Structures are given as C-alpha cells and as structure tokens.
Image (tube, helix red, strand yellow):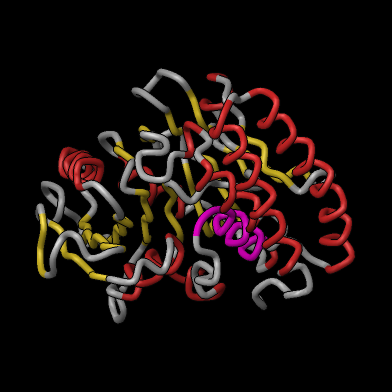
Amino acid sequence: MSGPGAAQVRVGVVIVHFGEKGPTQACLAALQRDRSRTARRVVVVDNGGTLGSGAWRGAEVVVLRSNPGFGAGANAGVAAFAGEALDAIIVLNNDIEVTDGYIDAAVEALRRPGTGLAAGPLYLDRPGGTLWYAGGGVNWLTGTVRQATSATATREERTVGFAPGAAFAVGAEAWRQVGGFDPSYFLYNEDVDLCLRLRRHGWRLLFSPDMVAVHRLGAVTGSASRSPFYLEHMAATRLRPFRPLAYRLYLAALHSGYALLRAAWYRAAVRGEGGRTAAAAILRGHGRALGQLMTPPRAD
C-alpha cells in the first residue's frame, strides 16, 4: 500500500493486534487517510490468531496464535520486511490513529543526524485535545518514566530520553544493531528497555512535533482504568530495563515500599473485591519483579 505519488523512500509499518477488531480497523483507516508521499508496506501482527491469514483491510497479516506479547509481536512484524531496504520502520499499537502526514514526518525526523528513533505528540481524544505524551525521559532517582503533557512541549523538536512504544519510528540500522525489542517482556516497559539500549549504542531519540497521533488508551489492556492486568504487568517489569545490578537493587528496595503503599491505598480507597484484586495484582507483579532481580538485562 502506498500514498499518492509515492517516492522511492520505503517505510515498513507494523501494527500489533490483539482482541477486538475495531481499534485495528480504525488504525488501518487512519494510515490509509495519510496522504504522505512515502511508499509504505503495512503488516498487521495478529497476536492470538483472530484475523485469519493472508490480507485484511488492505494490510498483510502475520499470525502468531500463541500471543507472545507486544515486543515479540512487533519483532515478528519487522521480520516480515527481511531483505527490504527500508528508510524507516514504524511500530504502532492497534489503538493508535495517525494524522495526515505522519509517515513523511517520521522519515524526515529519522534524517536528523544520529537519530535512531523518533516519536511525536500523542493525544487521548483528538489532535489538539488532551495530551498523553509530548516528550519524556527517565527519572533516575526513582527508575520511572516521566512524560511531558503541556501544549508548549509539543512545539519544539528536541532530543528526549524516552519515547513510548505505542507509536514510534525507528531507523532500520538502529533496530538491527540493538536487535529490536527484548521478547522476554510480555507487556509494558519493553519500550523503556529499547530506548535505553538505543541510547547506550549512541543513538539519539527525537521528539518530532509533526508526528501527531491519537492514542485510544487502554483499548485492549485496560491501562486507562488501571485494570488488575495492567497493574500486575507494569509492576512485574518495572525493574528489568536498568543496569548495573547495584542500581537495580536500590530500585528494588525503593519500589518494595512503593508497592506496599500502593496496595494499601487500593485496599482502603476502592471498596469491595475491586480494591482487594488490585492490591493483590500489584503485590503479585512486584513479587515477580523481585524474582527476576538477579537476571541481567538483555546484552547490548
């Protein structure tokens, strides 16, 4: 699939699908409305095998019936482009809707010197509405990610320390050099890990104001409502992207206190079974994080 008057520049677009078809249909429709002149090939990775093989809604489908998780799904989508000379790879959650010109803006951003990954403003409801991401970084004191959400932050192209996995473009060389996502992450914080590994290899992460998209947050995982699924998986992977071991041990002590306090808050503030379920999910997830504490992050 390619835009009108497509040039020789080639982009591979990967959409990771799971669950209901509606969000993925909207994601594909937005890509089709994008009048970028850049030639593109779109692959939908079906984590769970609900779309069927072959083509669907104008895109190729790669079926992964076992649902190996978001990162492994994205890796499988990129692998479908093996042997192609790509100028950029765009990875999207299926609950993302890009705006007109997104693909051209992504290619242009990756042309900036030393840039390995680029991402732009993400809005929750409509372009110009509630901001979810306008640049970000890692707070090394707490081992957490911070995201700018002010309108002024959307106006400046700049180097950032973190870009979310929901919607980004990455250079083919940068992706190859770090090996893509670490597939051992099932869900959440695989984007933190990818960003840190790119940075360690000397690649620049760029915020591009022209890469505008809408993020229908939590369409599949319930992250917008802080579902028990979200709480557990976020806690389970929070420590893993960081090195060295001494720093992870520091974070483990810090987050142990945080997990206990957060679980207690849910028990007190959310009545009934909902509060108990949420608290148990947090503690279960943090227990998994502690169990993996001695396992080093993926080698660069």
> From where the camera sits, is residue 35 visible?
no
| Residue 194 falls within the magenta-colored stretch | yes
Residue 72 inside the magenta-drawn segment: no
User: Could you tell me what secondary structure mostly forms the magenta stretch?
Assistant: helix
Quarter of the picture containing the N terminus is bottom left
Residue 190 picture location, percent across and down: 56, 59
Q: Position of residue 165 (x, y in %)?
A: 48, 51
Q: Is residue 131 above or below residue 147?
A: above
Which one is in front, 299 or 110? 299
Q: Which residues are magenta?
A: 187-199
The residue under the point 10% across, 63% down is 55
Question: What quarter of the picture does the C terminus occupy?
Answer: bottom right
Q: Give the residue furthest to the bottom.
A: 83
* Residue ID at (44%, 47%): 166
Question: Is residue 111 toward the left or the right of residue 49 in the image?
Answer: right
The total number of labels drawn is 0
Please tell me which residue is depicted at 30% across the width and 38% down the height of the picture: 98
Q: Is residue 18 above or below residue 144?
A: below
Q: Is residue 165 visible?
A: yes
Q: Nearer the viewer, residue 111 or 52?
A: 52
Query: In the rendered image, which quarter is residue 124 located in?
Result: top left
Relative depth, front residue between 299 and 101: 299
